[in-house]
Image (spheres, grey):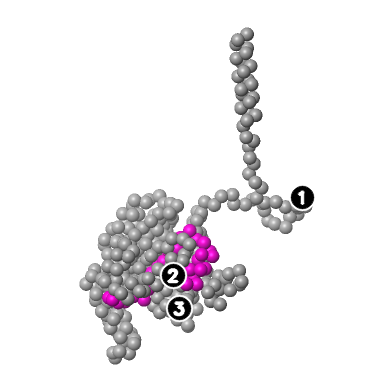
Amino acid sequence: MKTNLLFSLAILSVIGCKQNTPPIQEAPVKFQHDVTSGAKPWTGETFETTEDDFTFAIISDLNGGEREGVYATAVVQLNMLDPTFVLSVGDLIDGGTEDTLQLKKEWDSFDERTAKLNMPFFHLGGNHDLTNPVMREFWKNRFGPRYYHFVYENVLFLMMDSEDYEEKRMLEIYNARAKALKIIDGEIEGKYEDSEYYHMPERRIGGMSKAQLDYFTKVLKDNPDVKWTFVLMHKPLWMREDEKGLGPLENVLADREYTVINGHFHSFSNQMRKGHSYTILGTTGGSQNPQDSMAFDHVSLVRMAKKPVITHLKMEGILNELGKVPLRD
């Protein structure tokens, strides 16, 4: 009798638990319509259920003759596009000086505009940002390392310094550049095309130290299984064919998926090199050659899914709800 009573209580307890269990909630219907039969005026009803990708943006050269208001407009447009973060490829200030007060003024101006972004921004130095040892030290104190890497969502980013020379060579380039600028400004006689600076290979394609090569070689070896690798720099180190160019690092990159992006030329171009995409960006406020049809202001969006989908958006086509370019009214 006692056993039967205990069994009955157990059954009632189970029933009670089931009655108290909240009902299973069905997922809300995302797509609803009232077309119940026949043909439908849409192509399918299978929609993306989850987003396993992310999007980041890249800006190009501001300087080498910055045009007022362009970068401020780009900041507003980037907030409209809402990428996860924004990268740069250098030439963020006019630079080219050893006056630390002037450098602070220029960096304050850039950083004040950049602070209006609603997402993180990653600095990268160009020849205008890292012209001499004083500017190199200023960068270190303000932004830290000149070259670095990070991983986001199993995607590796190599942020390179294409102005990575020994101090003696850096000063030779700096002094030759200063003289060339005086020729351009008419302060001294001569032709810019005949100047020492004009014929220096570093003027166009930069250089990289062995220390930087060793650093990124180790980074690549430490991150062998990332989904994709992006290599960003200011000057096209990949055009330099000696040991100070990108070649040795390209050998380490050879067995992985990667994309290379740089600026400096103020003219957009893309090519396939060694089976990979290499892009030179246009400008995001820097000077332009009016005769060059590929010299335009743009921001680049990269949607990182199974592989990158890169879209370059001309700033003149990124319009607000009024159909206008923001801040250019």
- Residues at badges 3 and 1 in contact (C-beta under 8 Å)? no
User: Gap between marks 2 and 3, in whole Å?
Assistant: 12 Å
Q: Is residue 56 magenta?
A: no
Which residue is located at x 30 percent, y 83 percent?
180
Mark 2 lies on residue = 113
The part of the chain drawn in magenta is 72-99
- Residue 287: give x, y in percent of width and height: 43, 79
Q: Quadrant of residue 125?
A: bottom left
Q: Nearer the viewer, mark 2 or mark 3?
A: 2
Question: Which residue is more in the foreground, 119 or 163?
Answer: 119
Q: Nearer the viewer, mark 1 or mark 2?
A: 2
Disc nearer the start of the sequence (3/1): 1
Three-letter code, disc 1: Thr
From the viewer's perspective, is 7 left or right of 157?
right
Three-letter code, disc 2: Arg
- Residue 113: give x, y in percent of width and height: 44, 70
Does dot 2 land on a helix, a strand or a loop? helix
